[in-house]
């Protein structure tokens, strides 16, 4: 049974930082596309960043490039999202997701391609 558990959300002021964590268990493959998505109220879920576990190749949405960093700690089976210089536009529920196999540019941005999801962690940014 694959389980993804997010933590680290909270409320910060504009320009602040947060680090989200996603503790993963039950994933047996070394070739997994891991991603962070977010969903603001009334909007569709959107891809924020992805990481392919074999080689740690990363990709980012244009809106977060230069501000967010996705990384993994294999020893802890944990995925991270370091978010710096947060803006009100970053507000939303942040979800960790996993999908066996590749992590191509056209693949990771679509939520429907991911098999496993966490419960989400809320990020709020005040101006």
Image (cartoon, grey):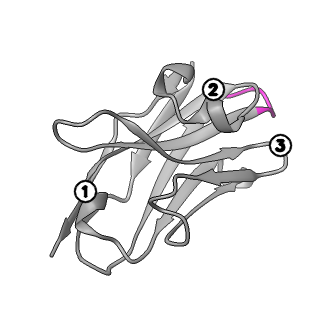
**Res. 25 visible in picture:** no
Residue 8 is labelled as none
Determine the main secondary structure of the stretch shown in magenta.
Answer: loop
Q: Earlier in the sequence, mark 3 or mark 1?
A: 3
Q: Earlier in the sequence, mark 2 or mark 3?
A: 3
Residue 34 pos. (x, y %): 62, 39
Left or right: 110 with respect to 93? Answer: right
Q: Earlier in the sequence, mark 2 or mark 1?
A: 1
Q: Which residue is mark 3?
A: 54
Q: Is residue 114 above or below residue 77?
A: above
Residue 110 pos. (x, y %): 51, 28
Query: Could you give the CA–CA distance between mark 2 and mark 3, rounded to whole angstroms?
Result: 13 Å
Number of numbered discs on residues: 3
Residue 99 is labelled as 2
Query: Could you give the CA–CA distance between mark 2 and mark 1, rounded to whole angstroms?
Result: 25 Å
- Dot 1 crowding, Cα within 10 Å, few <14, some 14–19, many 20+: some
Query: Could you give the CA–CA distance between mark 3 and mark 1, rounded to whole angstroms?
Result: 30 Å
Residue 104 pos. (x, y %): 72, 35
Q: Nearer the viewer, residue 30 or 17?
A: 17
Residue sitting at x 48%, y 54%: 21
Q: Which residue is mark 1?
A: 91
Q: Nearer the viewer, residue 80 or 91?
A: 91
Q: Is residue 47 above or below residue 10?
A: above
Query: Which quadrant: the N terminus?
Result: top right
Residue contact at pointers 3 and 1, CB within 8 angstroms = no
Residue contact at pointers 2 and 1, CB within 8 angstroms = no
**Res. 28 visible in picture:** yes
Q: Which of the 4 image quadrants contains residue 43?
A: top left
Magenta stretch, residue numbers: 26-31
């Amino acid at each position: 049974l694959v389980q993804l558990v997010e933590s680290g959300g909270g409320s910060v002021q504009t320009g602040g930082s947060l680090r989200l964590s996603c503790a993963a268990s039950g994933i047996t493959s070394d070739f997994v596309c891991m991603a962070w998505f977010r969903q603001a109220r009334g909007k569709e879920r959107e891809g924020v960043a992805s990481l392919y576990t074999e080689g740690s190749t990363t990709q980012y949405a244009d809106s977060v490039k230069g501000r967010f960093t996705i990384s993994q700690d294999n020893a802890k089976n944990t995925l991270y999202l370091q978010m710096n210089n947060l803006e009100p536009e970053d507000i939303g529920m942040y979800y960790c997701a996993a999908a066996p196999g590749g992590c191509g540019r056209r693949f990771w941005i679509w939520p429907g391609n991911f098999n496993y999801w966490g419960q989400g962690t809320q990020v709020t940014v005040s101006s």
